[in-house]
Image (spheres, grey):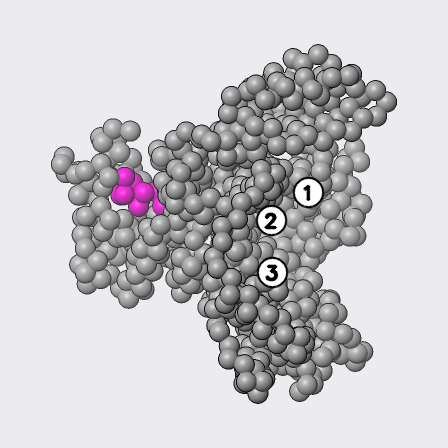
């Protein structure tokens, strides 16, 4: 886009922002914003500054149209981009704007600083800091979500590596956040646009099929709506009805979840009835409309969802049912009022408009829980913390009561132990069970809607690792881990003191270096594990004394020797140890980083030249997988924030990769000799092993070779295919 075109688009977007904002801004505030945008008319203004202000105006318009959260969020975004463009400074802006705008601007600056640090999305500590910064004010999250939507809408203008990061973060972080905040329309746009980039072929296929079936679908919706509309009008309702096709992303999810095809997904759309009703009559009119619909069409009692009586924690209110429509097809019907529909589309933001009517909103508590979860995580636990955080965004809820009648919300599947930890950490630590409606139940008993729960404790109770498999809530998991670490630390100190005291009594002087080697030799990962076993009386110290003294004598009297290995031993070791350091420049991780430890995943055995990606394991190592790895879809969908880019670099030499080939053929005399001879003649290819099974005149062999790259392996496969008697050859 040329500079002049950008200037015109910026001016048009800014005009729409002011028009949509109506009378929110004072004349002085409008003049201040107009002065900022007038800088874009300067002929010498750099293109990067125009890009920033186009981003500012576009995101501001999304904020107005989609969430309508007030003028401060709009002004904060515009001023933030103006500072980045060099049109003003933070100091100047903070002198002019009100306290809330200044606070939001500060939040945007902090998150920008964090995201500019290398690989914020995937380096767990930076990611944790980013979420902590987000959790200070819900409006900062709203601005970032809408900004991400703008980036997705204009993703073609970014570099390929930026496109990949924009789409993945939208899918795995911003869309779940939008869902949790009730921004369903924004959430659907984020999901569909990121899917369009990350899974273009699937997106295009589903979109094409939706277009092909649109006429028949529209006709069916009209036939379903017409009689219902007449009944509602006859009953005196003021309302509107529409059929809404579900998003491409949600259809794809159904296809995967149900393990079926597009043609077998029948609930591609939902019918929505939106009633114009005063607040005090909302529930009764919704239930009357429900009665009219279910009188006409047979309902499925298992598919009734009542979010009128108890709304979702993000404020969503609606009545959902599934009925048997014409031609024996199940149809989802959603019944709500205009107020409920606006909250459903704009989520938390709409509560500001209706806060005089209904102010219940526990999103602040949700953010507080996120902060508590992240602040109590060790670096080693951050990846699991991110999993729990993301899962909590989508969890369904269960509502139970305390003994005093206070209502508490939990994710579906939460247990007595979750309840105890939500009430108080000490209550959770000493929980031995509970009473549901007066009946004794164990700590793993799952909570159900309407339960009245009382906790039973014992001062002798202590948390165990098994508890982590019992609880569902992030707060409980975080606190249990903290208590276990405290217990482990105390046990370690007791074990260390016991061990050292016994050796002093035996008049044995400990050599720390030799003790560390001995600990490794007998199977412990570190000295802390050993001391913990001593404290728990899992070790025979008398036996350890004898073993240590023997080990000590050998270590002190043996000179350093150099050992040699047979070729077979060397190959076996290579096969089990794929650690690389990057010093050979064979692999580059993420942003041109070299010298990083990585490991080739055994599930797919990538070879130089294969399309690959990196995955940060829970131990902090990077495992390299093929793009076509059978585990790739699950890793990317569940742990997208741990995926990093990887590419091969330079030229692979020295036969450092192991490839395995499956060969099937006729069990003729000499066929395996011909194959092995062929392999031995290949330059830079060495045969490692052959295993063969023969049944009913056919053989199946697995051949392991060492070679330089995937191209060499493919060439070898083609040559083996030409051997007489071979029927098929494939890479494993």
> Eyeballing the image, is 287 above or below 464?
above
> Residue 285 falls in which quadrant of the image?
bottom right
Q: CA distance from mark 2 to mark 3?
A: 19 Å
Position of 282 with respect to 115 (left or right) is: right
Q: CA distance from mark 1 to mark 2?
A: 30 Å
Residue under label 3, please give it: 312
| Residue 54 drawn in magenta | yes
Q: Give the camera-side residue of 474 and 570.
A: 570
Residue 152 visible within the image: no
Q: CA distance from mark 1 to mark 3?
A: 23 Å
Nearer-N-terminus badge (2/3):
2
Identity of the residue drawn at 19% across and 38% down: 46
> Residue 62 falls in which quadrant of the image?
top left
Q: Which residues are magenta?
A: 50-59
Q: Give the camera-side residue of 451 and 227.
A: 451
Q: Nearer the viewer, mark 1 or mark 3?
A: 1
The secondary structure type at the circle numbered 3 is: loop
Identity of the residue drawn at 43% across and 50% down: 121
């Amino acid at each position: 886009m040329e500079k002049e075109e950008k200037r015109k688009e910026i001016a048009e977007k800014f005009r729409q922002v002011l028009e949509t904002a109506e009378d929110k801004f004072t004349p002085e505030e409008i003049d201040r914003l107009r002065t900022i945008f007038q800088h874009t008319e300067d002929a010498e203004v750099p293109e990067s500054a125009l890009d920033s202000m186009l981003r500012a105006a576009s995101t501001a318009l999304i904020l107005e149209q989609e969430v309508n959260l007030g003028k401060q969020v709009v002004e904060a975004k515009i001023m933030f981009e103006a500072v980045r463009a060099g049109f003003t400074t933070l100091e100047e802006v903070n002198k002019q704007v009100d306290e809330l705008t200044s606070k939001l601007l500060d939040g945007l600056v902090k998150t920008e600083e964090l995201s500019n640090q290398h690989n914020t999305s995937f380096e767990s500590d930076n990611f944790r800091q980013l979420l902590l910064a987000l959790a200070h004010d819900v409006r900062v999250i709203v601005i970032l979500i809408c900004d991400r939507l703008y980036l997705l809408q204009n993703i073609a203008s970014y570099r390929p590596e930026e496109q990949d990061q924009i789409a993945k973060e939208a899918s795995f972080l911003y869309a779940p956040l939008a869902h949790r905040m009730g921004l369903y329309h924004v959430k659907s746009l984020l999901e569909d646009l990121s899917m369009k980039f990350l899974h273009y072929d699937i997106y295009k296929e589903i979109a094409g099929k939706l277009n092909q079936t649109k006429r028949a679908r529209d006709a069916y919706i009209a036939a379903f709506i017409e009689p219902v509309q007449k009944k509602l009008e006859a009953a005196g309702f003021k309302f509107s009805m529409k059929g809404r096709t579900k998003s491409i992303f949600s259809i794809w999810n159904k296809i995967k979840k149900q393990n079926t095809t597009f043609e077998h997904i029948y609930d591609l759309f939902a019918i929505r009835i939106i009633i114009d009703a005063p607040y005090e009559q909302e529930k009764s009119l919704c239930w009357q409309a429900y009665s009219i619909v279910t009188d006409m069409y047979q309902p499925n009692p298992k598919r009734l969802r009542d979010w009128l009586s108890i709304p979702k924690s993000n404020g969503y209110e609606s009545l959902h049912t599934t009925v048997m429509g014409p031609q024996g097809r199940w149809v989802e019907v959603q019944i709500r009022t205009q107020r409920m529909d606006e909250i459903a589309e704009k989520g938390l933001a709409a509560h500001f408009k209706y806060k005089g009517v209904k102010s219940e909103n526990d999103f602040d508590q949700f953010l507080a829980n996120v902060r508590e979860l992240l602040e109590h995580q060790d670096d080693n636990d951050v990846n699991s913390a991110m999993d729990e955080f993301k899962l909590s965004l989508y969890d369904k809820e269960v509502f139970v009561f305390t003994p005093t009648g206070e209502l508490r919300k939990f994710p579906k599947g939460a247990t007595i132990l979750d309840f105890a930890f939500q009430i108080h950490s000490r209550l959770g630590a000493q929980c031995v069970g509970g009473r549901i409606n007066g009946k004794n139940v164990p700590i793993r008993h799952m909570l159900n809607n309407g339960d009245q729960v009382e906790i039973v404790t014992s001062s002798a109770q202590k948390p165990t690792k098994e508890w982590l498999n019992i609880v569902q809530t992030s707060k409980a998991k975080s606190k249990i881990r903290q208590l276990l670490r405290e217990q482990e630390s105390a046990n370690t100190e007791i074990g260390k003191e016991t061990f050292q005291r016994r050796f002093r009594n035996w008049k044995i002087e400990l050599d720390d270096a030799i003790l560390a080697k001995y600990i490794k030799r007998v199977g412990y990962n570190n000295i802390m594990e050993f001391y913990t076993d001593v404290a728990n009386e899992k070790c025979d110290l008398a036996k350890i004394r004898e073993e240590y003294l023997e080990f000590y004598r050998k270590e002190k009297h043996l000179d350093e020797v150099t050992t040699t290995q047979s070729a077979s031993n060397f190959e076996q070791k290579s096969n089990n140890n794929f650690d690389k350091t990057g010093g050979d420049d064979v692999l580059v991780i993420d942003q041109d980083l070299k010298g990083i430890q990585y490991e080739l995943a055994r599930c797919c055995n990538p070879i130089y030249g294969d399309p690959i990606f990196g995955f940060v394991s829970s131990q902090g190592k990077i495992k390299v997988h093929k793009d076509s790895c059978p585990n790739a879809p699950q890793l990317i969908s569940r742990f997208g924030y741990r995926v990093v880019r990887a590419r091969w670099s330079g030229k692979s030499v020295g036969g450092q990769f192991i490839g395995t080939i499956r060969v099937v053929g006729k069990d003729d005399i000499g066929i395996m000799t011909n194959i092995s001879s062929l392999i031995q003649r290949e330059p830079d290819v060495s045969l490692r092993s052959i295993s063969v099974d023969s049944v009913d005149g056919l053989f199946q062999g697995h051949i392991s070779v060492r070679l330089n790259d995937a191209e060499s392996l493919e060439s070898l496969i083609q040559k083996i295919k030409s051997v007489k008697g071979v029927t098929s050859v494939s890479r494993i």
